[in-house]
Image (cartoon, rainbow, N blue to C red):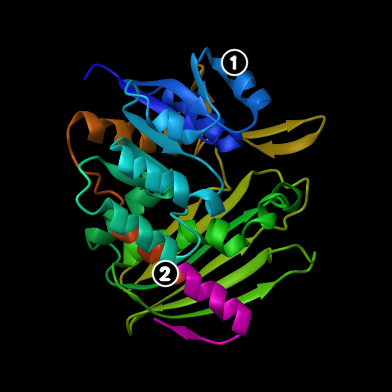
Amino acid sequence: MDKVRVGVIGIGWFGEMHVITYQGVVNAQVTAICTRTKSRLQEVADKFGIRKTYTDYNDMLADPDIDAVSICTHAPDHLEPMLAAIKSGKHILLEKPMALTVAECDKMMEAAKGAKQNIMVGHICRFENSYAMAKQQVDEGRIGDVLSIYARRNINGAFAVPHLDKLSSVTGDAVHDIDLMNWIIGKKVKSVYTMALNPRKLPNYDVGFVNLKYGEDTVAVAESLWSLPAKTPYAIDARMEILGTDGVIYINEAASPLVIDDKNGRSIGETVYWPSIHGNITGALHNELTYFIECIRDIKKPDIITLEESRYVIEVINAAEKSAETGEIVYL
């Protein structure tokens, strides 16, 4: 295989980010895109010189000249294109969250039984240097046994409004940190208790605190506030503290090394997930897509994140949402 020929399904903001990022991934080439809006399809095709365009993902998946697909539709719309892509035999990168319910995850898992192609869910934070290095330090025993993890992932409230039509801040963003906690702690969640607020009376709540207990000896808190002021200088206020019996690990992504003061005030440059350097997207998204392509070329099943792990975080998130609704502790 010379280059892995990729089709991108769903060309919203993040679908376009996939298109841009693949341009800087060695051995990958975006050859087709798919979205239902014809004007948007033409706009992106013209912008990036993409020859093949589709308004129906089934037509794209029938194209023999496409080896792999990125599915970047909204989370409520993951199931059907995912099932069709599994059936097509093409390699799949599905954006997180895997689905909104465990039942939908199980349908995907059932369809994927015996599948020969690579199927991966894009939990981008596992490909971010700070979190990956923290996991490595914990595995090496540097801070002893993990006692607790506190994480936060807060964003601009105005930016979040369109997303809150489809999911809560917990399902949209705490899913990242809970997946990281599952990965770093390496135990199953015993209980979940969520405190949530919806001060703006939007379709889903935008303030969430998820309290988790892992086994008998480890606790964690995931904070997700989609209500920061409009002039917040950073795109994401993401932080994590991992407290162990012999030490602590601190991660502060909001304290980016690139600070810009201009006539509009202060802004913090995005240098972590998808910064543009020398015309290409680098950072965690580049690392994730590169890994996906390398696994295809090396005929290797992805193991940095597995379908089972992707499903499990949705099981925890569903429990967190149930707790937010009932006000009670949910036991797993």
Q: Is residue 319 magenta?
A: yes
User: Which amino acid, by three-letter code, is at mark 1?
Assistant: Lys
Residue 95 against residue 76 in the figure, above or below: above
Pick the residue in front: 124 or 72.
72
Task: Determine whether, in the image, residue 104 is placed left or right of residue 48.
Answer: left
Stretch in magenta? 317-332
Name the residue: 37% across, 59% down: 107
Q: Position of residue 34 (x, y in %)?
A: 52, 30
Most extreme residue toward the right, as rendered? 263
User: Which amino acid, by three-letter code, is at mark 2?
Assistant: Glu
Secondary structure found at label 1: helix
Name the residue: 54% across, 16% down: 48
Q: How many marks?
A: 2
User: The N terminus appears in which quarter of the rendering?
Assistant: top left
Secondary structure found at label 2: helix
Q: Is residue 159 visible?
A: yes
Task: Determine whether, in the image, residue 73 is placed left or right of residue 58.
Answer: right
Q: Which mark is residue 47?
A: 1
Residue 142 against residue 285 in the figure, above or below: below
Name the residue: 29% across, 72% down: 187
- Dividing the picture into quadrants, the one containing residue 194 is bottom right
Whole-angstrom CA distance, mark 1 to mark 2, is 39 Å
Q: Of the residues under marks 1 and 2, which one precedes in the sequence? A: 1
Q: Is residue 194 visible?
A: no
Count neighbours of disc 1 (C-alpha within 10 A) and say few if under 14, some if 14 to 19, many if 20 or more: few
Q: Position of residue 178 (x, y in %)?
A: 44, 64
Residue, disc 2? 315
Count neighbours of disc 2 (C-alpha within 10 A) and say few if under 14, some if 14 to 19, many if 20 or more: some
Name the residue: 18% across, 39% down: 300
Q: Position of residue 225 (x, y in %)?
A: 65, 61
